Image (spheres, helix red, strand yellow):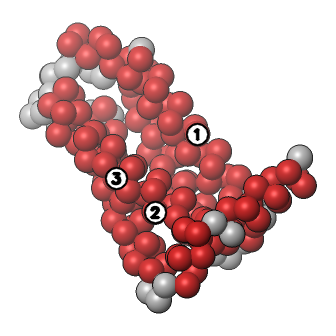
Amino acid sequence: MALEMGGIFSWMENTGLAEAIRGTAYLYPILESVHIIGIALLIGPAAAFDLRLLGLGRRALRVSTAADYLLPLSHLGFMIAAVTGVAMFLPGASLIADRGSAPWKLGLIVLAGLNILIFHLRTYRSVADWDVNRSTPAAARFAAVVSLISWSCVTVAGRLLAYT
């Protein structure tokens, strides 16, 4: 399995896009900067929504209104972070994949994604019952805590890619 993955990573490093990223002055730091903007757009609104689920602003703002305004920004941020993250991975795929924090980052992204999926397919379907001025159900509060922790840990694991 490791040999197969090594071959895939080697192939990734030799794609035209990887070579262009490696060979173009300032492209990698630009990708890093745009990646950080994507992370901010992902985590900032998601954290604000999670805090609303945890009860902050319960009397002032409907959960559905918070979702309507904040979650599209998070989706945009995720797309930006994902595209730039893949682009930054390509030129050094073998080295980055070998870092101890790489599986943690990927695993935490999967956890965060599953949390979102379960929340929207199950808990959020009954939002009309607890949308405003009502106590958020335990399942929604749990999803908010998992979201806050997992996205924070994804960020830490991403920074550790440079060191471990």
- Provide the secondary structure element on which disc 3 rests: helix
Q: Which residue lies furthest to the front in this view?
A: 16
Q: Position of residue 135 (x, y in %)?
A: 27, 20
**Which label belongs to residue 150?**
none
Viewer-proximal residue among 98 and 115: 98
Q: Position of residue 89 (x, y in %)?
A: 60, 65
> Can you say whether 95 is above or below 136 in the image?
below
Q: Earlier in the sequence, mark 3 or mark 1?
A: 3
- Provide the secondary structure element on which disc 1 rests: helix
Q: Do the residues labelled 2 and 1 touch (CB within 8 Å)?
A: no
Binning the other alpha carbons within 10 Å of mark 1 as few (below 14), some (14 to 19) or many (20 upward) gives some
- At 38% from the left and 23% from the top, the residue drawn is 120
- Provide the secondary structure element on which disc 2 rests: helix
- Rounded to the nearest angstrom, the CA distance separating label 3 from label 1 is 16 Å
Closest to the camera, between mark 2 and mark 1, is: 2
Q: Earlier in the sequence, mark 2 or mark 1?
A: 2
Q: Are marks 2 and 3 in contact (CB under 8 Å)?
A: no
- At 42% from the left and 14% from the top, the residue drawn is 122
**Residue 161 appears in the picture as rendered:** no
Viewer-proximal residue among 66 and 55: 66
Viewer-proximal residue among 18 and 38: 18
Q: Position of residue 14 (x, y in %)?
A: 69, 69
Of the 4 image quadrants, the one containing the C terminus is: bottom right
Q: Where is residue 111 in the image (x, y as percent from the top left)?
A: 58, 37
**Residue 10 appears in the picture as rendered:** yes
- At 33% from the left and 34% from the top, the residue drawn is 54
Q: Name the residue under label 1.
A: 110
- At 15% from the left and 22% from the top, the residue drawn is 133
Q: Mark 3 points at which residue?
A: 77
Q: Name the residue under label 2.
A: 84
Q: Which amino acid does label 3 sit on?
A: Gly
